[in-house]
Amino acid sequence: MKKLISYQLVTLLLSLTIAGCAPLSKNSGPPVDCTPPVLNGAAAAGETRLAFDFSEPVVMDPDSFSSEPLLTVEAAETEESRLVLTVSPMAVGREYRCRLTVRDQAGNSTWLVTSVYGYNPRVPGVLLNEFITQGSSTHPDLVELKVLTRGNLGGLTFYHGTPDRFRYRFTFPALEVAAGDFILLHLKPEGLPTEINETAEKDASGGLDSSPVAYDFWVPDGDGLSGNNGVIVLTVQPGGKVLDAVLYSTRTSESDEQYRGFGSYDLLLQAETLAAQGAWQIELELVRPEDAVNPDDSTATRSICRMPDAPDTNTKDDFHIVPTRGSTFGTQNSVEVYIP
């Protein structure tokens, strides 16, 4: 099983810190700041603006910035603990691997490498619309997104988990979409050459459960979803605002005492994060497994899906399980409900 990945392991791909002072003797006087600045987040703040949030005010060492693909720095300024770079225009949703060195007021420096994605001013409304957690060899785990408003998918990011604690994530490339479009994200591909990320024609991809009428995308080396308990989240960009989220669990508050019934510390933290952000509504003061969608009756052909055109309440009541062979990935959801 993949271990959960922390934010720092993703955003700080490489970080080398160099203290700007030496250890002090007992009589060396007042304490001296030897703590280098820490990167808390990085994102595109506009088509030509990169924002890096640090633990303290910093300045960038002259000529230390480089990126792949190439961006040219035209100006750099500090706004409290945020470093803002004005750069040449970025492509929507494109990944830029950035390297730079920053220094705090005491001279402590940090050299870092991090990824940002080109600013997307036209993020569409998108819902997590249908999904399978109990996939099979012929119908692997799969998530369907429904597009509500016209826009561009570039930079939108799917998480199996939450942005600060996840098993894997997938960031979509730039793709113009319209209201009513469906996006299929295949979470356990076979690695076949026919499994193509469709950024033009909807019928370009082969592979299990690909659709000729929806856009298909494939998570590289994806190993599916947790079968019974988990969180799936969609954000506007890596680490960005939550567009939609689903908490699912077969457990109850009585399942264990240590983790409020969720079975693990990680899932409890993920559930608490969604509740705290208002991305998932709960009945009582604390989030419980009873607040989650229960996938127990779902199978590889009995998917979990929304009622067509029903309001999004961010609760378990938004979803139902369809009858056997009632999955409708790539088309309008079924209104039929599985009855055990």
Image (cartoon, helix red, strand yellow):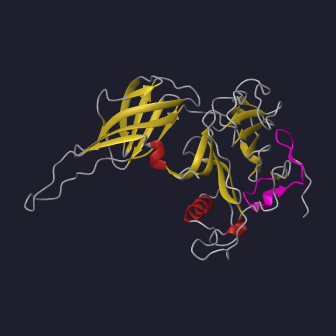
Residue 280 screen position, x and y as percent: 67, 59
Q: Main secondary structure of the magenta part?
A: loop
Residue 74 vertical placement versus 207 (above, below): above
Q: Position of residue 220 (x, y in %)?
A: 62, 37
Seen from the viewer's position, the closer of residues 197 and 283 is 197
Q: Quadrant of residue 108?
A: top left
Q: For residue 233: magenta?
A: no
Residue 53 coordinates in the image, percent (x, y): 42, 44
- Name the quadrant containing residue 199: top right
Q: Nearer the viewer, residue 16 or 163?
A: 16
Task: Describe residue 144's horizontal placement relative to residue 121 as left or right.
Answer: right
- Which residue lies at the image location 77% right of the left edge and 60% below the top edge? 295
Residue 43 screen position, x and y as percent = 49, 39
Residue shown at 68% from the left, 36% from the top: 218
Pick the quarter of the image with the C terminus. bottom right
Residues in magenta? 311-333
Q: Residue furthest front?
A: 137
